[in-house]
Amino acid sequence: MRALLSPISALLLSVAILIMGNGLQSTLLPVRASFEEFDPTEIGLQGSSYFLGFVVGCILGGRMIQRVGHIRTFAALASVASTVVLIHAMVVEPFTWAVLRAITGFCFAGLYLVIESWLNERAGNENRGMVMGVYTMINLGVIVIGQMMLTLSDPSRFPLFALASILVSLAAVPVALTGAAPPAPLAEARLRPLKLYRISPVGVVGAMMAGVASGAFWALGPAYVVAMGADTRQVAIFMSIAVLGGALIQWPIGRLSDRLDRRIVVIGACLVGAASGVGLVMGVDETGLPMALLAALFGAAAFPLYAICAAHAFDHTAPSDFVEASSGLLLANGLGAVAGPLLASVLMRISGPSGLFMATAVAHLLLAGFVAWRITRRAAMPKELRPDFDLAGTAPTMVAPQEEAAPAAAR
């Protein structure tokens, strides 16, 4: 394993530092916005702007890499993303923050594209799962570390913004100094969403609704906890517990979907996600252990949904179309993540903090209903004809399962 990871150690170090910085700012900004008494719809707009920028970056990032290469693209985008963090601290104004979040989303789409296409090329078919599994573990682990950094200082002051900026800047150093050869130029993937929907309606709708729920949570989860009167430490713990809940269940629930009709697993996860959302709505004035348990349950239900829906879509997709299918699913997920924060913020404005989990519960119930209807329209694929669950190919990243080492589009 050491021999396998050694050539990409610099890249993995950059990944850890970069995502740590992004994890910090993704929690810091909604908390600071709440302290500044931004309206919930303004905070939701900022979350939607991030994912809108991310979608655009998914579409255009590959062209940038084709033009100037992986290393230069990474260095340039990391520099811009680092600068944007500091501007947030200098100009505390809702519309400006929304524009800045869109720029950040664009930058991180390109950064993830560089990282994951590089990893995908360096890994062979016999070890790609292990390489991407290590990458996924690093991703989830350092997000939690970045969120817990929120406790190091007062979010209303400058140091945490500076720390996030420093981390994003430092992420460029290992990549810029690596002696490893960069990967070959990216191949562009076609986007034909109607064709993909005809192949797998559950895959497309599931990816989109998973984006609605997770996008709303990432954008407004910290604001929800602050509105309940929690302190900075409790915000960091709440978000981290949800991430850990999703991380711990991802592989077991994927294996369960190998044994059952994946659509049944999707319905089960949706019902658990809706129930935990209702619990968080009902317990809006509660803090402590009950909230922590509900956060873990929500994360365990909501975060694996994209992977299971993507696996279902790949079950019905020819290997030659894997890259195109991955790109289409990621686009659907991104569009859902743009809509989710806006819808949730409207409900929060009408009904208070509980509106966030009203929105996620509705999204989960709608998806459960759609999948139940689809079960009546198409028989389950026989187990022996389905590929096993592959976290590396179904996580919400740019890497699709494929027979060659070419990357898909973007996260």
Image (cartoon, rainbow, N blue to C red):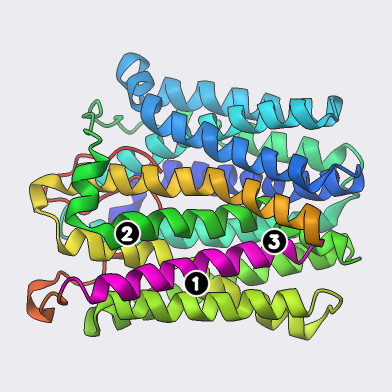
Q: Where does label 1 land, which residue?
A: 365
Residue depicted at 78% across the width and 48% down the height? 40
Disc 3 marks which residue?
356
Q: Is residue 87 magenta?
A: no
Q: Nearer the viewer, mark 1 or mark 3?
A: 1
Residue at coordinates 62% horizontally, 79% vertically from top-left?
A: 276
Please tell me which residue is depicted at 66% across the width and 59% down the height of the picture.
Answer: 145
Amino acid carrying mark 1 in the image: Leu
Question: From the viewer's perspective, is the residue at label 3 or at label 2 nearer?
Answer: 3
Q: Pinpoint residue 375: horizontal percent, then vertical percent.
A: 25, 75
The answer for how far apart the CA atoms under marks 1 and 3 are is 15 Å
Compare marks 3 and 2 and give the one earlier in the sequence.
Answer: 3
The quadrant in which the C terminus is found is: top left
User: Disc 3 on helix, strand or loop?
Assistant: helix
Q: Which mark is residue 394?
A: 2
State which tag comes first along the sequence, 1 or 3. Answer: 3
> Distance between the Cα atoms at labels 1 and 2?
22 Å
Over which residues does the magenta segment extend?
352-378
